[in-house]
Amino acid sequence: MEIKTTGHAFTFRSTTRALLVLGFFLFAIACKQETSVAPPLADKVKGENTFSAKGSVKEMSITPETTNFPEHEGRSEFMSYCAICHSLRYITTQPDFSKKIWEEEVHKMVAKYSAPIDSATCNKIVDYLMVIKGAK
């Protein structure tokens, strides 16, 4: 097939090829993603979590918790079972609750979130929570 326009002859094949090349370049320009280089990680400050992205690579540094809880009966159960699902520091941000509310909270963790805690251990955890965050 041949197409004639103003004295120039273009074959269907060369026109199609030219349109494909032009389409490819337009597509490449439209899809171009800006790539930015993230600044290097700052010197890690003790107790500070950091996050950076370098292209498609993501890097995260999480410092361990340093919350100190007092020695008392139920501490080891509290430290073991509660830390399975959430930060122990989370407990320190809670208000001082009554024993009834702490029992409801621990029961909710077992019933709703399937925390693997038997009733005897629940009682020890509630007693410990009363020591560290119980209403006075």
Image (cartoon, grey):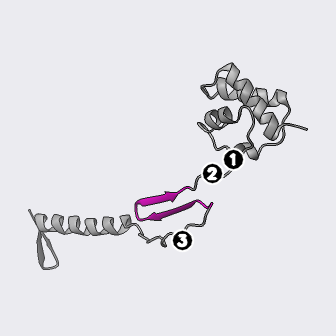
Identify the residue at image location x=77%, y=27%.
Answer: 104
| Kind of residue indicated by mark 3 | Ala
Specify whether 34 is left or right of 88.
left
User: Looking at the image, is mark 3 or mark 1 earlier in the sequence?
Assistant: 3
Of labels 2 and 3, the one closer to you: 2
Q: Is residue 68 above or below residue 134?
A: below
CA gap, disc 2 and disc 1: 7 Å
The numbered mark at residue 17 is: none
Q: Position of residue 15 (x, y in %)?
A: 16, 67
Name the chief secondary structure element in magenta: strand
Residue 110 belongs to magenta span: no
Residue 56 belongs to magenta span: yes
Is the residue marked by circle 1 packed among few (<14), some (14-19), or many (20+) residues within 10 Å? some
Which residue bears the numbered disc 1? 89
Residue at the farthest left position:
1
Name the secondary structure under disc 1. helix
* Label 2 with label 1: CB-CB less than 8 Å: yes
Instruction: Examine the image and state in which quarter residue 34 appears.
Output: bottom left
Which residue bears the numbered disc 3? 42
CA gap, disc 2 and disc 3: 20 Å
